[in-house]
Image (spheres, helix red, strand yellow):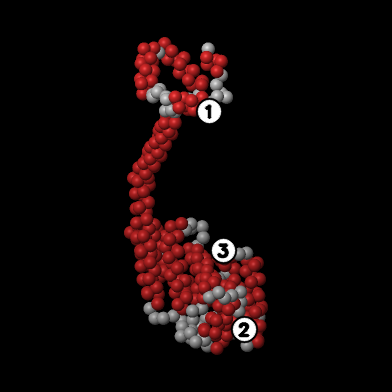
Amino acid sequence: MDNKKDILKELNEIAPNLKGLPKEDGFNLPNNYFAKMQQAVLERATKEESVKDTESFLSRLFNGALKPKLALASVLLLAGLSIGYLLTQQNAVAEECLQISCLTYSEIDAYVAENLYTFDEGEFESDIETASENQSWNFDDDVLENYLLEHSDDIDLENLLE
Amino acid sequence: MVSDKEILFLFKNDATRERALKMLMDKYQQRLYAHIRRMVVMHNDADDVMQNTFIKVWKGLHKFKSESQLYTWLYRIASNEALTFLAQKKKKFATSLQDVEHDLSNRIAADEQFDGDAIQLKLQQALLTLPEKQRQTFNMRYFDDLKYDEMSVILETSVGALKANYHHAVKKIEKYFSEH
């Protein structure tokens, strides 16, 4: 009560012309408003609670069971892709060097040095003969003459005759 | 009248949480409604803000620390919700807040949920010309009979600033009455 008196006294001190200002604001509200309001609030609250429970369940499911499995699956997939890529790269390198022309001299030297003592002369001769048979060495005179004329500048006849 | 302590105790238990909310609403709804209504003026708007306020309470009451009074906490939520509502209304209609309040001032006389006399109508119209914070301060001091210490906790504003606010509000209302 003292507080209310203090407030009125304060108002009179600040604005004496407002003496008698009404303490009621004049607002009213519909009948049974608070009961309806409470019902609406409780419905919303329980609805939010059930949504929250569903979200919580899904969250627990994900974190508890699925997340570790998903993590493991991701790791395995990544590993598999990496291995596949590396293998593909190796095959590409291997395919590139199936042809002897891609080998460097140092690679050839290294190969010869490694395999020198396992070199089979007989097999080599046999391979040469086979290659010779497959190769057509029968040139007719016209072909030979044309070749000589085209490459006459390159041919050292003196060495050839020797 | 049920105590705040009992309400908080019941709220902690899942089985009694809804009952606690109902008890809380029974205890505080009239005061909170009056405060909200004076800020937003129209009943339908006050209803929206009331519901939003209690839903916020429902979600946040488990975090309430008993360092402050429960009513102070509720009052602060209601105040913030009312101010947020007014700001959103201003945005929604792409008008200034003064335009919103000018519109409310025109509508209040025709509002069937207002049955005040001519002086009460003039007072509400005068209040709508004030900046929101001044209007809020006036309402809390004059209509809700709150002490400056209590208002300071609710609004997180110093007592000195609140006194100044109230002083300016009263002077402006006095001027409005002399001019209208």
Vertical comparison of A63 with B134: above or below: above
Neighbourhood count class around disc 2 (C-alpha, 10 Å): few under 14, some 14–19, many 20 upward:
few
Q: Which residue is mark 3?
A: B153
Q: Which residue is mark 2?
A: A19
User: Mark 2 falls within which chain?
Assistant: A
Vertical comparison of A136 with B94: above or below: above
In this orientation, which residue lies closer to the viewer: A103 or B35? A103
Classify residue A43 as left or right of residue B166. Answer: left
Pointer 1 or 2: first along the chain: 2
What is the three-letter code of the residue carrying label 2? Lys
Spatial CA distance of label 1 from label 2 is 129 Å
- Measured as percent of width and height from the top left, residue B159 is found at 62, 66
Classify residue B162 as left or right of residue A141. Answer: right
Seen at 66% across and 83% down, the residue is B175
What is the three-letter code of the residue carrying label 1? Glu
Instruction: Give the quadrant of residue A51.
Output: bottom left
**Numbered tag placed on residue B3 in the rendering:** none
- Measured as percent of width and height from the top left, residue A55 is found at 37, 55
- Measured as percent of width and height from the top left, residue B101 is found at 56, 78
Q: Is residue B122 visible?
A: yes
